[in-house]
Image (cartoon, rainbow, N blue to C red):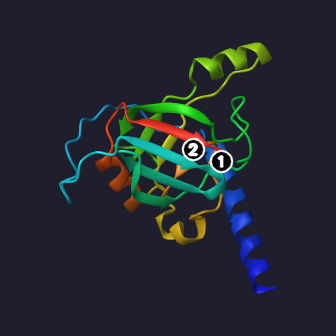
Amino acid sequence: MGRNRLILSRVGLGLAVVLALGMAGGCSSTAQKDVAKGTDSRSGSPYADKILVKKSERKLYLLKNGQPIRTYRVSLGVNPKGHKERQGDNRTPEGNYHLVGRNPGSKFYKALHISYPNTKDRVEAFRRGVSPGGQIMIHGQGRRVQDLEDVLRGADWTAGCIAVTNAEIEEIWGYTTNGTPIEIQP
């Protein structure tokens, strides 16, 4: 029974965060900024050459030459199953994209902008007569919810973005550059 209460409290908290995000404009970050970054100053390690997200595992992998160099547990959109089809569906997209920008002043601590929607996403949305949405990011927990990191970790609470802890977005930020490809799998 204690486990069920924990699950219900996480779901309730997730819904509260989603409602707050909805009022605050979803996962979109504040003004987009491109910031160049050198190699990770903590380790001198080379950049990851690809990001792989496996939604069903709630995992993000930084890859170098096809091998994982870092693994992170992620939170996804509140409606995580399936590919993002339209603005407001709270789904995390699936497909091949790349990092197109960085926002060091995001309301979610730091944010890496993913190139969603791609041409295929735009065509499908046009065919349906809907907006595909946008502003999909890999981001931290934010400054106001940092004390809730353990509760939110792995719970799906975003409006379609991919969330990690603030410490983890720092590391991902350091291991990637704009242009890094990202594959998001179901």
**How many residues crowd around disc 2 within 10 Å: few (fewer than 14), some, or many (20 or more)?**
many
Residue bearing the label numbered 1: 77
Q: Residue at x 65, y 43 (%)?
A: 23
**How many residues crowd around disc 1 within 10 Å: few (fewer than 14), some, or many (20 or more)?**
many
Query: Looking at the image, which is closer to me, 27 or 76?
Result: 76
Position above or below: 129 against 160: above
Quarter of the image for residue 131 reads top right
Image x and y of residue 165, in percent: 46, 60
Q: Residue at x 68, y 60 (%)?
A: 14
User: Upstream in the sequence, badge 2 or badge 1?
Assistant: 1
Quadrant containing the N terminus in the rendered view: bottom right
Measured in 3D between alpha carbons, the distance from the residue under mark 2 to the one under mark 1, in whole angstroms, is 6 Å
Image x and y of residue 25, in percent: 59, 38
Image x and y of residue 182, in percent: 48, 38
Query: Is 69 on the left or on the right of 7, as rendered?
Result: left
Secondary structure of residue under mark 1:
loop
Secondary structure of residue under mark 2:
loop
Image x and y of residue 20, in percent: 64, 51
Residue bearing the label numbered 2: 161
Amino acid type shown at disc 1 = Gly
Query: Is 57 on the left or on the right of 3, as rendered?
Result: left
Amino acid type shown at disc 2 = Cys
